[in-house]
């Protein structure tokens, strides 16, 4: 299987490649237009800052390419947020696959939301074979509110989208590559789509 | 609910796991990757690897090790030790570390925290603070593995580190470290109530109840320990069952 992991100018992108390697898949970590388009599966990972990442993607036309993809796409963390419409982080217009906003957590708890949190109301292909009430690893200061595309929710300060799905586009706010066996199962489910 | 985190800490010298007792005497306890993978299987929520290698030449061994850890581990891990400039942080990030912890270098040059946070995000920077409660009733910050006393005080330094963009504070009480008599709960609660970022407690874990205390009385978000895990004095699954029975949310 040909899996492209989108490379950009921030964060620990290597770890998604390593997680796939643990599942027996050698990923192609790339920002090359054609390699991304030709892949069977595309993963859009992310730890970083919205504005500078969008700039990097735009300069290479990857923002437009992503929304045109027909194969399964998985956005992770910042990847999920950038697939939305607009982020309060640096007042950044995003790719807009999910027409929902990304908001900053109000200062009513510790921010960033960092650590293991259970998810609820999970549905769809990504969560097949998981026990309910499983914990996943989150690190983020911005969140996607609940909306029509929410495929799992999480409760921290407020109830927000732990995962989104629309057609061939999947996204998680948590890091499956760092979420132990449960996370590994989510990645495996994505690879098997 | 967000879970309280249990974090085994592995001290690494020349690519091998060691544990210092009271920052002095050192015993070897095994292969860092194997030990880390075992902890991950047993339910550790995160790991910390501290490089205590003395010489610059051998630091390369550590980044090679970080790569192997990243490949084998499916939970987050922090690495620390000898991170003095942005280049060191970048090298560890590209080796696959999720976070780095800085200690003496941040005390000497507090702007270093901002520099890393700006480049790689706050979530990537843990500021580790070693402090000792002294006769004047104040917690004084020490550097160089607890050998040199500074003129910084724990609470104001932790606040400054937060303002400069650190994502977490890892506080080790030198009074409690190695004693196995429990964590510095009062100081920890004070930290946790005054900071808006997570606080990791370190120093003093000896039995299950110390962890229950540090999460309730000490209000810590995470607790770190070394020898009790390395020598299997408290297996992680046993600890987590104990905490669950005390109605503490763990994964």
Image (cartoon, coloured by chain):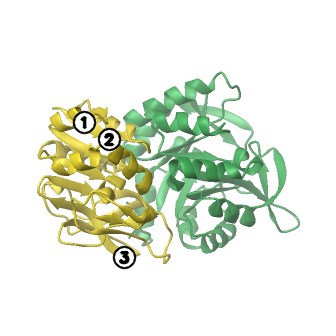
Chain colours: A yellow, B green
Label 3 CA crowd tier, 10 Å (few <14, some 14–19, many 20+): some
The residue pinned by badge 3 equals A158
Can residue B82 be seen by looking at this rendering?
yes
Name above or below for residue A103 compared with residue B228.
below
Which residue is rendered at x = 39% and y = 62% of the image?
Answer: A92
Question: Disc count in the image?
Answer: 3
> Disc 1, disc 2: CB below 8 Å?
yes
**Sequence-first tag of 2 and 3:** 2
Parent chain of label 1: A
The residue pinned by badge 2 equals A60
Q: Quadrant of the C terminus of chain B?
A: bottom left
Distance of label 1 from label 2 (alpha carbons): 8 Å
Q: Are marks 1 and 2 on the same chain?
A: yes
Which of these two is toward me, B20 or A23? Answer: A23
Which residue is rendered at x = 46% and y = 57% of the image?
Answer: B239
Distance of label 2 from label 3 (alpha carbons): 35 Å
Distance of label 1 from label 3 (alpha carbons): 38 Å
Secondary-structure class at tag 1:
helix
Residue B183 % position (x, y):
64, 61
The residue pinned by badge 1 equals A33
Residue A150 % position (x, y):
21, 67
């Amino acid at each position: 299987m040909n899996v492209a992991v989108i490379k950009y100018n921030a964060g620990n992108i290597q770890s998604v490649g390593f997680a796939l390697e643990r599942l027996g898949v050698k990923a192609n970590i790339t920002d090359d237009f054609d390699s991304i388009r030709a892949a069977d599966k595309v993963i859009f990972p992310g730890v970083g800052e919205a504005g500078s990442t969008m700039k990097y993607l735009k300069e290479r036309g990857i923002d437009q390419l992503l929304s045109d993809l027909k194969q399964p796409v998985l956005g992770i963390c910042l990847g999920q947020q950038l697939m939305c419409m607009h982020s309060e982080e640096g007042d950044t217009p995003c790719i807009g696959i999910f027409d929902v906003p990304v908001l900053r957590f109000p200062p009513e708890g510790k921010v960033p939301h960092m650590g293991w949190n259970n998810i609820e109301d999970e549905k769809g292909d990504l969560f097949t074979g998981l026990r309910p009430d499983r914990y996943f690893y989150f690190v983020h200061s911005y969140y996607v509110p609940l909306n029509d595309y929410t495929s799992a929710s999480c409760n921290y300060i407020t109830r927000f989208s732990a995962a989104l799905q629309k057609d061939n586009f999947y996204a998680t706010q948590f890091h499956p590559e760092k979420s132990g066996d449960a996370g590994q199962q989510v990645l495996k489910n994505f690879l098997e789509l | 609910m967000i879970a309280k985190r249990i974090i085994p800490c592995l001290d690494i010298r020349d690519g091998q796991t060691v544990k210092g007792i009271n920052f002095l005497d050192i015993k070897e306890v095994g292969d860092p990757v194997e030990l880390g993978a075992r902890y991950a299987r047993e339910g550790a929520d995160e790991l910390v690897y501290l490089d205590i290698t003395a010489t610059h030449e051998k630091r390369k061994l550590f980044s090679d090790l970080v790569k192997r850890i990243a490949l084998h581990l499916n939970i987050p891990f922090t690495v620390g030790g000898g991170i003095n400039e942005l280049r060191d942080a970048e090298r560890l990030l590209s080796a696959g570390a999720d976070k780095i912890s800085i200690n003496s270098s941040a005390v000497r040059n507090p702007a270093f925290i901002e520099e890393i946070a700006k480049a790689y995000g706050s979530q990537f920077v843990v500021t580790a603070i070693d402090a000792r409660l002294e006769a004047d009733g104040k917690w004084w910050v020490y550097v160089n593995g607890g050998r040199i006393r500074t003129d910084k005080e724990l609470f104001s330094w932790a606040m400054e580190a937060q303002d400069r963009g650190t994502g977490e504070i890892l506080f080790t009480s030198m009074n409690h470290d190695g004693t196995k008599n429990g964590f510095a709960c009062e100081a920890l609660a004070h930290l946790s109530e005054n900071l808006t970022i997570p606080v990791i407690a370190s120093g003093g874990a000896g039995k299950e109840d110390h962890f229950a205390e540090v999460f309730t009385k000490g209000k810590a978000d995470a607790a770190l320990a070394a020898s009790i895990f390395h020598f299997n004095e408290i297996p992680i699954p046993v600890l987590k069952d104990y905490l669950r029975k005390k109605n503490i949310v763990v994964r």
